[in-house]
Image (tube, rainbow, N blue to C red):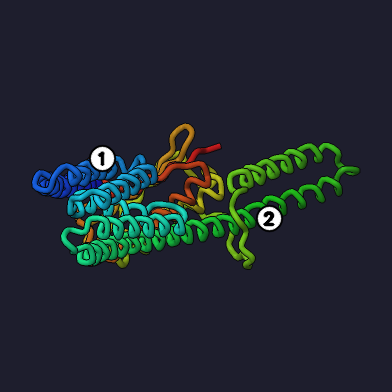
Amino acid sequence: MGESKRVVYWIRRLSEIAMLGWLSMMLLVDMAIAANLGWPQWCAAVAGVAGMVAVVLRRRYRVQGFLVMLAVSLATSLVLALSSVNGVPGSSETGSLLVLTIGALRHVQPVRRAAGFAVAALAVLMAEGIGRDYYGNGVAFSFILFAGWSMAAGVGGYLRFQQERRNEAVHSVRRAERLELARELHDLVAHHITGIVVQAQAARTVAELKPEAVVPALDAIATAGGDALTSMRRLVTVLRAEERADRTPGTSLADLRHLTERFAETGSRVAFEIAQGIDDTTPPPEVMTTLHRVLQESLTNVRKHAPGTAWVEASLRRSDRSVVLRVRNYGSAPDPRVSRLGGGFGLVGMAERVEALGGRLYAGPSPEGAWEVVAEFPLA
C-alpha cells in the first residue's frame, strides 16, 4: 500500500471512530435524560442504539438501514406523543439520522431517490420535534432539528456535486481517449487495406504471365488482412468521431527517444533505455502509438507534479509475451502548490488506452521510493 493510500485509510478510520465516539456520548446523555423522565423516554435511547447500528452498517445496508431508522424514529415519536410524559428528541437518534441523510444524498442513485430520502428524513425530524413537546418547546425543537437537517442536506448535496463533477470529467477523458483510438484504428485499417488492394491488383496483373508470383502475393494479402482484423478486434468497441483523421499509422522508437530528448532540454535529465530485441516491428502499430502516448503523459506529469525532480529513468523491455514501458522519477516530492490543484485524469486516459489494447497500467510509488508508471502490453 502506498504512503498516500495509507494516510487516507487511517484518516477514514479515525474519522469513523470519532463520529461513533460522539454518537456514544450523545447516547449517554439520552440515557441520563431517560432515567430522569421515565420509561417512555427510554424509547429514544433505544432509537439511538438502532441509529448507531445503522451508521456502522451504512456502507453495506445503506438504503435498508436508512428506512429502518426512519421507521424506528417515527414510531418513537408516536409513542412519546401518546404518552403522558413530556419527552425530548434523542440526540444520538437525531445525529444518526443526519449522518444517514448525508450518506443517502451522496451515494443513493438516482438523484431523485436520494432527494426523496432526504425529504422523508426531514418529515421524521419534524415529527420528532412536534411529538416530543417538552413543556411547549416543540417549535424550538423543530427549528433546531430543521437547522441540523439543512446543514446535513447541504453537506450531502455538495459531496454529491463534487462526485458528479469528477465522474463527468472521468467520462469525458475516457471518451476522448476512445475517440483518439478510433481515429488510429481508422488509419491502421486503411493502411492495411491499401496494402491488400495493391497486392490484389498486382496478383491479377501477373496471374497470366507469371503464375508462380501469385502465391507470394496471396500470402501478403492474408498477412495484411490478419493484421487489420487483429487491430479491429482490439479496438472494435471504441466510437469513431466525425472528424478528419490526419494521423499516420503508429510511431517509431526514434520518436520515443526524440520525445525524451526534447523533455531533457527543458526539464530533468532522462535516461531512456531500449532493450535488445526490440525494433519498430516488435510491437503492433497501435501499441507503438500508445507507448508514445504513455511516455508523453508520464513525462508531462513529472514536469507538472514534480518539477524539482533530479532525473527520470525510462526503459522499454520485452519478455516472451509482452513489452513493458517503465518511467520512474527520483529525487523530488510533488510540489504542494501543484498538488492542491487536483488532477489524475491523465492517468485515467492512459489506463483507458492501455486496457483497450488488452494491457495493464500501474501508477504509484515503487519499493525504492520513486514514483513510477508501468505499462505492459501483450504481444500477439
Q: Horizontally, is 222 left or right of 16 in the view? A: right
Residue at coordinates 82% horizontally, 37% vertically from top-left?
Answer: 212
Furthest residue toward right: 208
The residue type indicated by label 2 comes to Ala
Furthest residue toward front: 84
Residue named by callout 2: 190
User: In this rendering, does residue 260 appear at all?
Assistant: no
Report if the CB atoms under discs 2 and 1 are less than 8 Å apart: no
Residue at coordinates 15% horizontally, 46% vertically from top-left?
Answer: 27
Residue at coordinates 73% horizontally, 38% vertically from top-left?
Answer: 219
User: In this rendering, does residue 98 appear at all?
Assistant: yes
Q: Horizontally, is 125 left or right of 175 in the view? A: left
Q: Horizontally, is 335 left or right of 250 in the view? A: left
Q: CA distance from mark 2 to mark 1?
A: 61 Å
Q: Quadrant of residue 156?
A: bottom left
Q: Position of residue 330 (x, y in %)?
A: 23, 52
Please determine whether, in this image, residue 264 is positioned above or below residue 85.
Answer: below
Q: Quadrant of residue 28?
A: top left
Residue named by callout 1: 53
The residue type indicated by label 1 comes to Val
Q: Horizontally, is 50 left or right of 321 in the view? A: left
Closest to the observer: 56 or 181? 56
Q: Residues within 10 Å of mark 2 (few under 14, many from 20)?
A: some
- Mark closer to the chain start, 2 or 1: 1
Closest to the observer: 375 or 132? 132
Q: Position of residue 57 (x, y in %)?
A: 30, 40
Judge depth for marks 2 and 1 and give the one in front.
1
Q: Position of residue 3 (x, y in %)?
A: 21, 46
Please determine whether, in this image, residue 3 is positioned above or below residue 158.
Answer: above
Which numbered marker is on residue 293? Answer: none
Closest to the observer: 178 or 48? 48
